[in-house]
Image: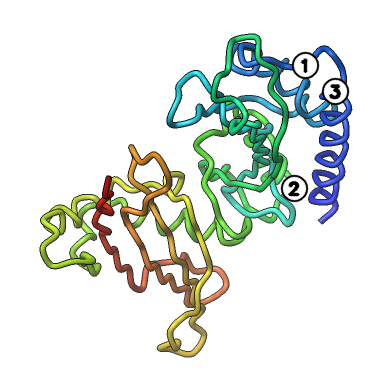
Amino acid sequence: MRRYFGLLSALVSAWAAATAASAQTAELTVTAVRTLPVPELARALLGERLGSRVIEAVRHDYEASQSVPRSVDFFTQPFAPWPRLNRICQTDVITIEYNWADLDEAQPSTPVTIFHIEATSRYLAIPEPPGDPSDPEYQRAHEAACAALTSARGAFRAPDAGDAQWLAAMEAEWSRTSSSSRFDFACDVSANVSCESTPQALSRLRLNQAAIVQRMGCPEMRRRGQINFCYRLIFPYADAVIDEPEWDMTLVGEMQDGSAPVEIRSLRLLHMARPIVLH
């Protein structure tokens, strides 16, 4: 909780600093936001306090014009979440959306300003450190492993770090093609020929490809002591101009006691036909 408020405070400070900077003559330009080294761009947009935590960035152009920068996602140095959860690291992702709608006739020297800023947490699964999870040495090894990560762009969305732990375990299970026969596959229309390839597609889906990850209501538990974890994941088309949903996954995991591994109780994967665009 303290870390959340720290990030929120840092974002407010970054927004204030960026707003003040936009009133000065030394503004960022189209060329600058597209070519500045990541550390320099992060400090210019987020300020020193938050910008110094950034280790990499993903820059996005406006889909209709490769000359117009749309936004940038900054990924901060991963850290062990609190409460600590085995095998999970957390990164803060700060998204800066530029005033791209005003840049139709943009030139390299055209000034760029911040239109919107938001932040969220994403998660990475790491190998289990050796030792007893209750041992302080294990905890230090976990923290060191997160701090040693040099990339975070593979982080995935989850409602919180606890959900990330269960989702990572279930991803490892569904990625094994030999288990695909246990699951339910469907298509939104019977004429969708892609239905035939849906079971093969499951093993290729990765958590970090999901644009939406939500908790959902769980079915009735079958046995005493059973704990269910239920989610809906939406995976967009890889080449979509906007986030057009391609795969809609309903995932139910179960655990029999507090120390047992989470296993998939049911998985339903629905393929969504691409919408027909009328011109």
Q: CA distance from mark 1 to mark 2?
A: 48 Å
Q: Which residue is mark 2?
A: 136
Label 3 CA crowd tier, 10 Å (few <14, some 14–19, many 20+): some
- Amino acid tagged 2: Pro
Foreground label between 1 and 2: 1
Q: Amino acid type of disc 1? A: Glu
In the visual, does 63 lie left or right of 277?
A: right
Q: Which sits in the foreground, 197 or 262?
A: 197
Q: Amino acid at mark 3?
A: Ala
Tell me whether circle 1 and circle 3 mark residues in contact (CB < 8 Å). yes
Which quarter of the rendering shows the C terminus?
Answer: top left
Please identify the quarter of the rendering in which residue 36 is found. Answer: top right
Measured as percent of width and height from the top left, residue 265 is found at 36, 73
Q: Name the residue carrying label 1.
A: 27
Read off the residue under disc 3. 21
| Gap between marks 1 and 3 measured at Cα | 7 Å
| 3D distance between C-alphas at marks 3 and 2 | 45 Å
